[in-house]
Amino acid sequence: MKRFTRDQMAARVARDIPEGAYVNLGIGLPTMVANHLPKEREIFLHSENGLLGMGPAPAAGSEDPDLINAGKQPVTLLTGGAYFHHADSFAMMRGGHLDFCVLGAFQVSASGDLANWHTGAINAIPAVGGAMDLAIGAKRVLVMMDHQTKGGESKIVAHCTYPLTGVKCVNRIYTDLAVIDVTPEGLAVVETVDGLAFDELARITGVPLRRASATAG
Amino acid sequence: MKRFTRDQMAARVARDIPEGAYVNLGIGLPTMVANHLPKEREIFLHSENGLLGMGPAPAAGSEDPDLINAGKQPVTLLTGGAYFHHADSFAMMRGGHLDFCVLGAFQVSASGDLANWHTGAINAIPAVGGAMDLAIGAKRVLVMMDHQTKGGESKIVAHCTYPLTGVKCVNRIYTDLAVIDVTPEGLAVVETVDGLAFDELARITGVPLRRASATAG
Amino acid sequence: MIDKTVASPSAAVADIADGATVMIGGFGTAGMPSELIDALIRNGARDLTIVNNNAGNADVGLAALLKAKRVRKIICSFPRQTDSYVFDALYHAGEIELELVPQGNLAERIRAAGAGIGAFFTPTAYGTPLAEGKETRLINGRGYVLEYPIAADFALIKAEKGDRWGNLVYRKTARNFGPIMASAAKCAIAQVRKVVALGELDPEVIVTPGIFVQRIVEIDVADQLSPPQAAA
Amino acid sequence: MIDKTVASPSAAVADIADGATVMIGGFGTAGMPSELIDALIRNGARDLTIVNNNAGNADVGLAALLKAKRVRKIICSFPRQTDSYVFDALYHAGEIELELVPQGNLAERIRAAGAGIGAFFTPTAYGTPLAEGKETRLINGRGYVLEYPIAADFALIKAEKGDRWGNLVYRKTARNFGPIMASAAKCAIAQVRKVVALGELDPEVIVTPGIFVQRIVEIDVADQLSPPQAAA
């Protein structure tokens, strides 16, 4: 079994994003999805600090400190993009106007609860940013994460043990082992990495899984 | 006793509006206040349909159907004015950013309750517009009205019999007989029309009045 | 390539079905999407709930829609005007339902729908007949009324210019309800005086970003410049 | 004649007193009113409550204000950054109070203060630790948390251009919290790159109308163009 690389995971997410979609890509791994969106597809990237129609990073030397993304990295604006203030920007998210948010995670539960903002460590300084707004901020919330912790524990869990970011908000999970839908009937495996049998995935994951019906993808 | 004319009432209100004030003038009698604001004073007129820095009516023939006031009359915009949408416009009012609203009224109660949107007639089609927003929409709410109905009844009352527009919202009342403050200690007469004694005003008004202290004006 | 422009008002409103809730922009005639309303009348949908500041003037636009008996209910702030005789007659005959909402609460409830707010406490109308039966609360000693969002299936609005992504700018006080109604409808349809090339609208100046607009239709300039009075 | 321009940052912040609640615009360094913050440090006010998205970077701006022990409490969404060591140390030493608010709730609570909303139900943070102890409600089957406005005595913001009436336009994503913070403060102070003559800002394009701005101060362009990194 050869795990999906991060680029493969990002490319797999990109495949699910159709032309015309309004999309927010979270900080970290989800940001890589932008590199895999086909150039011929017009897709609208939203950044919660106040822009729609976000373009790629600027050429070295032409960074503008007033044009940054939610990760505070310099970006560009596509022709046809727009700027707006924070209340309007989060209204777009909270109001359900985005088609997709793509987020990283520490844990996702079988019912779609998301934990991605706090490890629960006692001494950690809590910081949430837009994580909770993103978790409820799109018609479909997609999560990208390693299937297991470095210690080999499944990050897909019956109940999150880390502090929650949102309740029943995740629609699909992309890991280095599989693509899994969160459905009212539980977790449904859409696809797995080559060489990984369904039963083995179920054993690794440790929560009930079923095969998605052919039409579910 | 000679009653204040409408122009005199409007001029009297205008005297109370200092330079730099943000002001909404309601439909009808209050609109006349604009004619009496000294030209050398910069005062910002707000119209709740979405403009700040409203200017006078345009010259005949240069009306613009896209540039109207809350009474749907053509107006102009002063240099330095701005346009905005309805939610932002009413946020200005509700958020307490206006210094003054000037409103007409059917009745004002001794505690500052305002009735100006509905006569209570059973068959009347109710219509409220921005009346209730204006009633709570400024740091100071000024009312301009005849002191009495055509039938000779006081429009300043112990308790409003008409349906309320707002509760304890009026700060000062300008009538054709007097200028009266609504204070926590009751109604205080600031001035009366020449030839009208305080006791006579009190008799006409029919609710307890007191003389304002010299510093109250 | 994403192109939200639609060939005609009729095509733009073709899927508005019986029973739909439709927001209609405009304050008086400023910002009223007359050509879209006319197309909605031709479309024939019935049993509509309409959200507008007013309830129509004379026999045109929204009043014509009412006159054609297409509207079950209207949510507005100021139905009674000197020339609102179509609405007046329907109301007195009990043939239309009216939900009267203070203008600022109307705007904020529409904004709340677009912004995903579940409900909000507003001071407007507290202690008045328009708050009767509603939940109230004292917050820091001031009275507030709990109001819920108003969402719609469709919004018909009028803007000055737009592009194929649906970005819009407005003209003067014709802006009024356009931006918030666009945000509160599942499908916002904007009629514009001019569709411009992508990039012609300055990103600092766009009032309604395209995310809030699903369809855009250019109306012949000559039509739009005819004074509203003439149409009446 | 109304002229809201003020000669210097120091003059603009001179009356910010001990115990004040001060909103500070900016998201990272974009839109951060650095010269106003520096003036506030010189001003010497203590026991401040600060509202900002973050909690300062390196040793400059907001971090310098924290380091000078002027801040009792900070309300923000994301204090922990790679270079937030000043805040981190104060927090671990128990020398600063933190109210952590999800970013969109922070924005909406500030907007609510400016718009006179008494409280609102938001879906963000429902069911999470940040909703603990707060009133919640199911509305149409969805969970919401009741959140209250955040108002301030002063707002320090940065805009691109302004005029003597206080009208403002911003630049790109430096707009971020500026417009809503201006609306939520009793006294909003804007530093701008350029004060322009009245009328130079197109009325269709003004983002913050002057009603929300009490003072405006032009900062020498050369200062503002120096890259924030250099200051760190």
Image (cartoon, coloured by chain):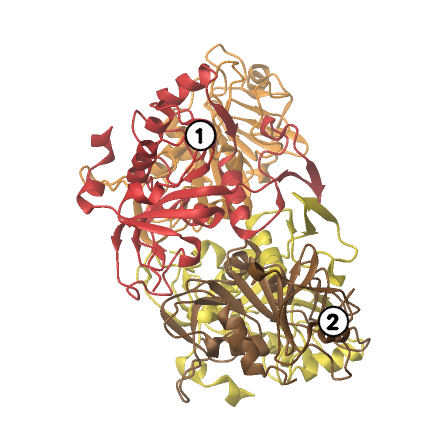
Chain colours: A brown, B orange, C red, D yellow
Q: Which residue is mark 2?
A: A202
Does D206 sit left or right of A102 as displayed?
A: left
Residue D6 appears in the picture as rendered: no
Does A124 sit left or right of B137 as displayed?
A: right
Q: Chain of mark 2?
A: A
Residue at 45% from the left image edge and 86% from the top image edge: D226
Quarter where residue A170 is shown: bottom right
Does C42 sit left or right of D62 as displayed?
A: left
Q: Quadrant of the C terminus of chain D?
A: bottom right
Q: Which x, y percent locates residue B44?
A: 40, 48
Q: Residues within 10 Å of mark 2 (few under 14, many from 20)?
A: some
Quarter where residue B56 is shown: top left
Position of residue D70 relative to residue A50, above or below, is below
Q: Residues within 10 Å of mark 1 (few under 14, many from 20)?
A: many
Q: Nearer the viewer, residue B11 or A25?
A: A25
Q: Which x, y percent locates residue D179?
A: 49, 61
Position of residue B154 relative to residue B39, above or below, is above
> At label 2, which amino acid type do we have?
Ala
Does A196 sit left or right of A119 as displayed?
A: left
Q: Which residue is mark 1?
A: C78
What kind of element bears circle 1?
loop
Q: Nearer the viewer, residue D149 or A103?
A: A103
CA distance for labels 1 and 2 = 62 Å
